[in-house]
Amino acid sequence: MVTMPSLKLESVEPSICSAEFDNIPEELIARVFNKENFGNNDYGALSVEKERIELPPKHWNDDYHTLKNYFYPHVVKITQELIESDPIHYPFFHNMKDFKRWFDNHFINGPGNFGFIPIIDQVGFYQSPHIDNRFSFMAGIINIQENQTGTIFLADNKISSPWREHHGLGCTEEEVIYRASGKKHSGTFWLNGDNNWHAVPKVLETRKILLLNLYF
């Protein structure tokens, strides 16, 4: 059973937290992350570099659902931690007697959705500074290997000249609120909002993550 020995609030404005996980079954990860089953997704109007490939729904087998279920209780706790850190923007959640029931009623049983996507970002992938679309309430990534590249969270949407030239590799410390760890079995999670600008610098070594979203 996957455990979460560490959960830490990293930022309140915007709301960001980090976590570390133990007992993730390596054989299960290896089966889920069989690269032969991965491919490019159609993101519609969203611009996503072709170097990102993901596990499509046709390969969401028993192994995939087992892995998702292992993380489910931790995602509930992480979501509650993020919401309770921001009583100004989310006052109606505070003092809720049964947060898990609300979570299940909305994101498991509908009308929302708990998105859980195995992702492989190949060398050359990057994401310019952006805010997640408003269908996403909370998002997060979990490193399933030691990753060199982590998501960075920016003070605003200003894109410096080094970013444009180097896709984030020249981003200054003054522009960065928080740098997500690439440590194996660590994760970073955030609430979507007007000020939660984030980006992925150019990937120099293959990056393997679980991408989580809670959709309205």
Image (tube, rainbow, N blue to C red):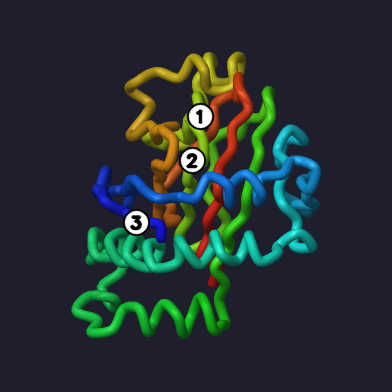
Circle 3 sits in a helix, a strand or a loop, which is it? strand
Q: Are marks 2 and 1 in contact (CB under 8 Å)?
A: yes
**Quarter occupied by residue 79:** bottom left
Task: Give the Cα separation between the discs numbered 2 and 1.
Answer: 7 Å
Task: Give the Cα separation between the discs numbered 3 and 1.
Answer: 20 Å
Q: Which mark is residue 147?
A: 1
Tell me if 35 is positioned left or right of 194 in this view: right
Q: Return the residue at label 3.
A: 3
Residue 70 in picture, x, y percent from top left = 46, 63
Crowd tier of the residue under label 1, counting other residues whose Cα lies within 10 Å: few below 14, some 14–19, many 20 or above:
some
Task: Give the Cα separation between the discs numbered 2 and 3.
Answer: 15 Å
Q: Nearer the viewer, mark 2 or mark 3?
A: 3
Please tell me which residue is depicted at 46% across the width and 85% down the height of the picture: 105
Q: Amino acid at mark 3?
A: Thr
Q: Earlier in the sequence, mark 3 or mark 1?
A: 3
Q: Return the residue at label 2.
A: 143
Residue 66 in picture, x, y percent from top left = 56, 65
Residue 78 in picture, x, y percent from top left = 34, 60
Tell me if 6 is positioned left or right of 71 in this view: left
Q: Earlier in the sequence, mark 2 or mark 3?
A: 3
- Can you see residue 135? no
Crowd tier of the residue under label 2, counting other residues whose Cα lies within 10 Å: few below 14, some 14–19, many 20 or above:
many
Q: Amino acid at mark 1?
A: Asn
Tell me if 20 is positioned left or right of 62 in this view: left
Circle 2 sits in a helix, a strand or a loop, which is it? strand
Q: Nearer the viewer, mark 3 or mark 1?
A: 3
Above or below, 38 relative to 84: above
Q: Amino acid at mark 2?
A: Asn
Above or below, 102 relative to 149: below
